[in-house]
Amino acid sequence: MKLARIGAPGAERPVVSGADGTWRELAPLLGGADLTPATLPTALAATDTDALPEVTGAPERFGPPLAAIGKIVCIGLNYRQHAAETGAEVPGEPIVFLKTPDTVVGPDDEVLIPRASVRTDYEVELAVVIGREARYLPDAASAAACVAGYAVSNDVSEREFQLERGGQWDKGKNCETFNPLGPWLLTADEVPDPQALGLRLWVNGELRQDGGTHDMIFGVHEIVRYLSHFMTLRPGDVINTGTPAGVALGSPDTPYLRPGDVMEVEIDGLGRQRQTLGKA
């Protein structure tokens, strides 16, 4: 099952697509509400979506697949080849940082290069959406039971802000529009092995990233288990699980992003994004 939100920014409405691929209005099942952490469990429990009214015409715009996200937890340097390209040691434990929910935009919305930026970079990532409360999980199986589903995320980063301006990574990660998400949330039952997904990203038609989740240092379920010992994960929380090799930071010959550039991002089964870069 795919869960999504369509419509103009700030006026999105929830939709669902089942086995037949038809988008249907989800609001009647949610009592007229949007798809939020509060209504996500109801949406996940839906069994008779074929009775919902069909969406008329093609969706005009996909927004982020979830509204009112609680928190976005990110894992850094989580792909072996990405760690190697940046000259970093393979971490012994997950590197954790946070992005604010207001960085999230739709999958095809404009991404803004911050003022004074010279090193805005891209990162295709598998996003994990939490479906039930998780705290002090004992093992991978219990972690897997807490995953609602998966989505495409682009963890846009400003490398000078992140690495050369002192303090934490957060300064290079939390600029406005720096987390396109979607187009949809694919429920976990549709992804039998989250460690067998291909991830790709193009800039201006040039393939820059072409990797797979098999290269993760810490797998999806281990990340969820690990994080639950440091923070409570709640329905609607999002985890960005790291990026494969191919980012501009990893190669002196690869240019950073500039206004007018176009990023295209996809993950097997999770859809495709397309963003044009503008100026903040």
Image (cartoon, grey):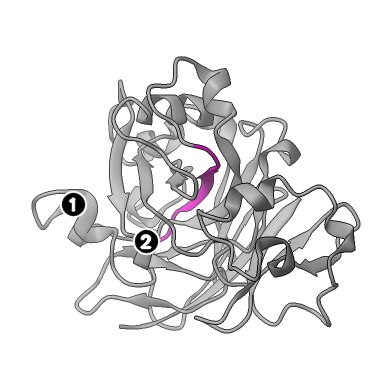
User: Could you tell me how far apart the alpha carbons at marks 1 and 2 are, in whole angstroms?
Assistant: 22 Å
Which quadrant: the C terminus? bottom left
Residue at (25, 71) in percent of width and height: 118
**Above or below: residue 199 compared with residue 36:** above
Residue 94, percent from left and from top: 33, 29
Q: For mark 2, does the 10 Å Cα neighbourhood hold few (<14), some (14 to 19), or many (20 or more) residues?
A: many
Please identify, in this view, whether the residue under mark 1 or under mark 2 is nearer the observer. Answer: 2
The kind of residue tagged 1 is: Leu
Q: Which residues are magenta?
A: 122-132
Badge 1 crowding class, 10 Å Cα cut-off, few under 14, some 14 to 19, many 20 or more, is some
**Residue 129 belongs to magenta span:** yes
Is 11 situated above or below 249? below
Q: Pointer 2: what residue? A: 101
Q: Is residue 217 visible?
A: no
Q: Which mark is residue 163?
A: 1
Quarter of the rendering containing residue 81: top left
What amino acid is found at the position of numbered circle 2 in the picture? Pro
